[in-house]
Image (tube, rainbow, N blue to C red):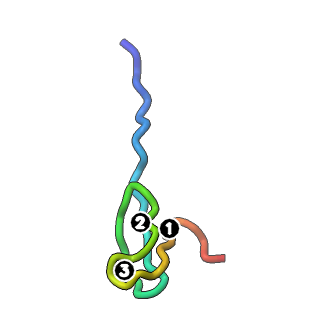
Amino acid sequence: MHNVPDLSTPESTYECLGCGTIVTADTHPVECDDCGGSMRDRAMSLE
């Protein structure tokens, strides 16, 4: 029996830079569904 590696992409949390909406997704959302603002990965530094 062989172990099969888990190749699934973990979900990340993203935040809208315009209105502050927070969503969890498998892929990086391009824009906020609420206001159309840019989304950022909350795990990444703002610096």
SS type, badge 1: strand
* Residue positioned 44% across, 79% down in the render: 16
Dot 3 or dot 2: first in sequence order is 2
**Amino acid type, mark 2:** Thr
SS type, badge 3: loop
In which quadrant of the rendered image does the C terminus lie?
Answer: bottom right
**Amino acid type, mark 1:** Asp
* Residue positioned 33% across, 82% down in the render: 34
Residue at the left extreme, as displayed: 34
Q: Which residue is mark 1?
A: 41
Q: Which residue is mark 3?
A: 21
Q: Nearer the viewer, residue 35 or 20?
A: 35
State the separation of the CA atoms marked 2 and 1. Answer: 6 Å
Residue 35 spot, x, y in % from top left: 37, 85
Q: Are marks 2 and 1 in contact (CB under 8 Å)?
A: yes
State the separation of the CA atoms marked 3 and 2. Answer: 10 Å
- Residue 13, labelled with which disc? 2
Circle 1: is it few (<14), some (14-19), or many (20+) Cα within 10 Å?
some
* Residue positioned 41% across, 66% down in the render: 13
